[in-house]
Image (tube, rainbow, N blue to C red):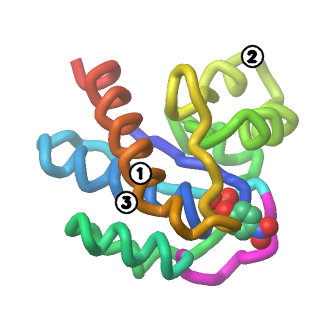
Amino acid sequence: MKILMVCLGNICRSPLAEGIMQHLADEQGLNWQADSAGTGNWHVGKGPHQGSVQVARKHGIDITQQVCRQFKAGDFDAFDLILAMDESNLNNILRLARTAQDRQKVKLLLNDKEVPDPYFDHTQFEPVFELIEEGCKDIIRQYSR
Ligand code: 4NP
């Protein structure tokens, strides 16, 4: 199973989501690959935000090797599941969908809520970590049977 985590900048939320999902999947012995991308291109080529690096490290996950990239239509072919952090990301992804099959691969990470953006409020990195972890555990429960 190949999962792509998507947010706006690919420096705060989706790098965390990639790191957490890969960590949990590896821990459970699942042959899953997680990746991440942003719908925007401002930070392409950069590493994750220090707030994300630090909160991940605190929980035993190293995300420092990740490099920011922009979401592209080819990702619909490369991934089985594309998980957006918020409604705006979801709509930006769906705008690039070419077929019904593309659209079916896309959903919010959390069923009933958005992952808030910690970029403008650095107190949010820890709660965001916990929300994403909860979402990843749900996805594993749903798709690992
Ligand atoms: P992210 O946070 O989407 O969680 O990576 C953001 C990072 C950068 C910007 C916006 C959101 N920005 O506007 O540069």
State if disc 1 and disc 3 touch (CB < 8 Å).
Answer: yes
Residue named by callout 2: 100
Q: Nearer the viewer, residue 91 or 31?
A: 91
Q: Main secondary structure of the magenta part?
A: loop
Give the x, y percent position of residue 101: 68, 19
Q: Is residue 54 magenta?
A: no
Say the numbered circle drawn on residue 34.
1
In the image, is residue 33 above or below residue 55? above
Q: Nearer the viewer, residue 13 or 104?
A: 13
Q: Is residue 45 magenta?
A: yes
Disc 3 or 1, which lies upstream in sequence? 3
Left or right position of 15 against 1: right
Disc 2 or 3, which lies upstream in sequence? 3
Give the x, y percent position of residue 95: 87, 35
Residue at the image point whose x is 47% and y is 52% from the top: 128
| Nearer to us: label 3 or label 1 | 3
Residue at the image point whose x is 29% and y is 74% from the top: 57
Say the numbered circle drawn on residue 44.
none
Residue 41 is at least partly visible in this image: yes
Local secondary structure at mark 3: helix
State if disc 1 and disc 2 touch (CB < 8 Å).
Answer: no
Residue named by callout 3: 19
In the image, is the residue at mark 3 within 8 Å of ligand 1 by its beta carbon? no
Q: Given the image, on which type of amino acid does mark 1 rest?
A: Ala
| Nearer to us: label 2 or label 3 | 3
